[in-house]
Image: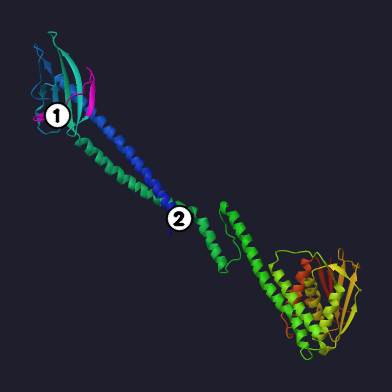
Amino acid sequence: MQSQSLSFRLIISATLVLAAFFGLVSLVLENSFRETAEQALREKLQVQIYMMLSAAEVKNSGELSMPTNLPEPRFATPGSGLYAFIQQPNKKLVWRSQSAVGLVAPAPPLELFPGSSAFLHAEQGRYALHYHVIWKNVAGIEREYFFTITEDAEFVSQQVRHFQESLRVWLLALGVILVFIQFMVMRWSLKPLRLIVKDLEAIEQGQKTHLDGQYATELEGLAGHLNVFINIERSHLERYRDALGNLAHSLKTPLAILRGCTDSFVGNKNTVEEQILHMDKIIEYQLKNAAAKGAQKSTRTVDVSTTIKKISSALSKAYVDKSITFDMNLPESCQMYFDEGDLYEIAGNLIENACKWCASTVKISILTNQLKGQKNFALLLQIEDDGPGIPPGRLNEILKRGVRADENIKGHGIGMAVVFNLINLLGGKLVGGKSDLGGTKWSVYLP
């Protein structure tokens, strides 16, 4: 699991938090247990103090006497760990148990008042309980005594160690279980992320076109934005591919014209220069279209009649062997708000197709302000030929990219698709039908 992985970071974070939490819990519980064990020992020693008080007797002389054997057998066994002492305020030792032979009695605190007790952690690793008492016998003689009982701290320490061992084992086991549960919860929680990554890999491998899985609510917005991004990138890729195809197709006609001028370059010098300039404009136009993000409106006018005459003149040289007659019904001037590159694409492709399929005649006409039932169109461009024509059932089919009217005739099947898409982008309409000349008539309605 890599250090940059979300799973790794979550597991490490959860482990560190649990370790810190269980460390604090262990410390608190151990201190609490130690205090509880010490309190239990104090109560136990308090009972022993009461037992000694009940066994002690004060003689008429005021001296204190203790029986030889006490109810607690550990007081009679040397080194048993339980020791008893009786002292006077001047630290004079009055009595000690047989188990305390050879031991020094711990000094009681000076601020201990009669009737009170003090529980201390004495030296030599023992706990001591001191009890201050004033004893008055029947003769009225009073004596002050300090009853002290000590016990080795090993008993408490052993209990604390045993508790620590058990506690740490249980906390470790609980920590491992909680980390495992956290890992499973994390995997379940991150499953939607793994699902969206899997779908993205499927898109990368071409198995899917977009993110279509059932994602978590928090990821729906991300999936939507990714789909938009994928669609935009795919649209850009398709636009660049189409632009390359359009560029290749657009250069066909100028190249054919230049090829027709090779036999007599001197007499066609103006035509060659005009076509070279036209090719440069085509390249600039197609590159601009490839980078465009949407439809753009022209801010200058172009003379449609002049442009069509240039196209017809150039194509007559390209198809010089057919001796094509151009029957043109054009106004002297027809100024329209148009991009010149768009006009060359539309009119150039349609006129070239007419030249390719005609027998000898191509008819071109422009009608303005005569809408022919087509509302909101200001220009009607009609191009007809006297060729074999296109069957009515195939008129819509050849508008698709890559489809040609006759597979035996050389071509790429791009031109009509370019014309159709471009007219739609401009808000126009392309209508195909039967010409009075016998061939095909294309009507272009432009706003």
Q: Residues within 10 Å of mark 1 (few under 14, many from 20)?
A: many
Residue 390 in sight in this render: no
The answer to which image quadrant residue 110 occupies is: top left
The chief SS type of the magenta part is loop
Reply yes or no: does residue 115 show up in magenta.
Answer: yes
In the rendered image, which residue does mark 2 sit on? 7
The three-letter amino acid code for the residue at tag 1 is Tyr
Say if the magenta span includes residue 248: no
Q: What residue is rendered at 87% in x and 74% in y?
A: 305
Q: Callout 1: helix, strand or loop?
A: strand
Q: Type of residue at label 2? A: Ser
Residue 410: x and y in percent read 73, 85
Return the mark for residue 83: 1
Q: Nearer the viewer, residue 305 or 372?
A: 305
Q: Which residue shows up at 73% across the image and 82% down it?
A: 411
Question: What range is drawn magenta here?
Answer: 99-120
Q: Position of residue 81 (x, y in %)?
A: 15, 33
Q: Earlier in the sequence, mark 2 or mark 1?
A: 2
Tell me the crowding category of disc 2: few under 14, some 14 to 19, or many 20 or more residues within 10 angstroms, Cα based.
some
Establish if 169 lies above or below 194.
above
Q: Nearer the viewer, residue 159 or 414?
A: 414
**CA distance for labels 2 and 1:** 60 Å
